[in-house]
Amino acid sequence: MHIMEGFLPAGHALAWTVVSAPFVVAGARRLKRMVAERPEARLTLAAAAGFTFVLSALKLPSVTGSCSHPTGTGLGAIQFGPPVMAVLGTLVLLFQALLLAHGGLTTLGANVFSMAVAGPWVAWMIWRLAERLGLPSAVGVFLAASLGDLATYGVTSVQLALAFPDAAGGFTGALVKFAGVFALTQVPLAVAEGLVTVVAMNALEERRLRAGI
């Protein structure tokens, strides 16, 4: 999903930065209020950010100019909501671009929108729907993390298809090709991420119970 440095045309890179910016600004305001009201949440925030950093750094080769990997954003989206995850995801992507050459600065806006905005919102909505349907918590977490992961790659496929339409099939043809290549690696990764997120969520709940929070 991390679109590499310089891969997108300048206009596309700028457009995705403009689209992503309001979500990050709104998330920063929400995060500031949360920390002021719930200072005890700082450790869990750090855990959610660390979880995202580690999982999204485990990349596999995929589409030229991009890669496949877990996203790790479902955990934070469930715990704190998608606005806060927009900030945590942006910080993760920024550090990975600077320290790991994973992604890039010119493509940061596009990567933020797919992994830190679209994925968390889908994960959160799936989680809330699972709650309303009365599904077991573990099932809801699994579905939220897995489908949030797949949503990220769906958005990345759209971004790449917009930037590089197929010579014969245009946007639709390119979208089918990009999504098809991603699916080979991303579907099993999404299932694995869902399982890992369930384990991580259970560990956080146990810690919260022991701490009496």
Image (cartoon, grey):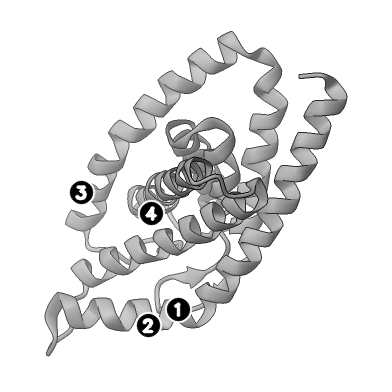
Relative depth, front residue between 140 and 148: 140
Q: Residue furthest front?
A: 134
Q: Please indicate, yes or no, whether residue 4 appears anywhere in the rendered image.
A: no
Give the side of residue 46 with respect to residue 30, left or right: right
First of labels 2, 4 by sequence position: 4
Task: Report crowding for label 2: few under 14, some 14 to 19, many 20 or more residues within 10 A (C-alpha).
Answer: some
First of labels 1, 4 by sequence position: 4
Q: Residue at x 41, y 65 (%)?
A: 153
Give the spatial CA distance, label 3 vs label 2.
25 Å
Q: Residue furthest right?
A: 210
Q: Residue at x 76, y 35 (%)?
A: 205
Amino acid found under the numbered disc labelled 2: Gly
Amino acid found under the numbered disc labelled 4: Ser
Task: Report crowding for label 3: few under 14, some 14 to 19, many 20 or more residues within 10 A (C-alpha).
Answer: few
Q: Which residue is mark 4?
A: 114
Q: Position of residue 68 (x, y in %)?
A: 51, 71
Amino acid found under the numbered disc labelled 3: Ala
Q: Which residue is mark 2?
A: 180
Q: Secondary structure at mark 1?
A: helix
Task: Report crowding for label 4: few under 14, some 14 to 19, many 20 or more residues within 10 A (C-alpha).
Answer: many
Q: Residue at x 67, y 33 (%)?
A: 46
Q: Which residue is mark 3?
A: 15
